[in-house]
Image (spheres, grey):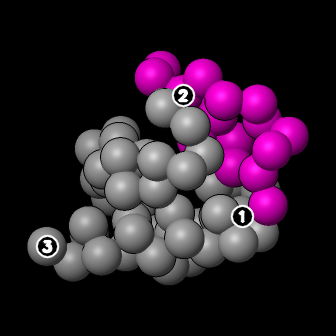
Amino acid sequence: MKWTDVFEIAIQLADQYPDTDPQYVRFVDLRQWVISLEEFDDDPDRCGEKILEAIQAAWMEEAAD
């Protein structure tokens, strides 16, 4: 998985952290959680705030379903 796989990352995070409200996750924690995902294999330093915002938004959408 790469940083651009926003929806796949959101699904993985929702599965791994089912009791977490993504709206309140700090970007520092979100970045670390993404990097820690087993299938993640992108450069950790290629992440910016826009990508984290997109992941968080997708995760919120996934959690609402």
Q: Is residue 4 visible?
A: yes
Q: Nearer the viewer, mark 2 or mark 3?
A: 2
Q: How far across and down, in percent of the image, does residue 24 sit? A: 56, 76
Task: Name the residue that disc number 1 marks.
Answer: 27
Q: Gap between marks 1 and 2, in whole Å?
A: 17 Å
Residue 61 placement: quadrant:
bottom left
Q: Residue 28, relative to residue 50: is it above or below?
A: above
The residue lying at 79 percent from left, 61 percent from top is 48
Q: Nearer the viewer, residue 46 or 27?
A: 46
Give the number of the mark in front: 1 or 2. Answer: 2
- Residue 10 magenta: no
Give how far apart the Cα atoms at labels 2 and 3 are.
24 Å
Answer with left or right where residue 15 lies relative to residue 28: left
Pointer 2 with pointer 3, Cβ within 8 A: no
Q: Report x, y in % for residue 40.
A: 54, 28
**Residue that numbered label 3 is attached to:** 65
Instruction: Indicate which disc, 2 or 3, sits on the residue closer to the N terminus.
Output: 2
Label at residue 40: 2
Q: Magenta stretch?
A: 31-48
Residue extending furthest toward the left:
65
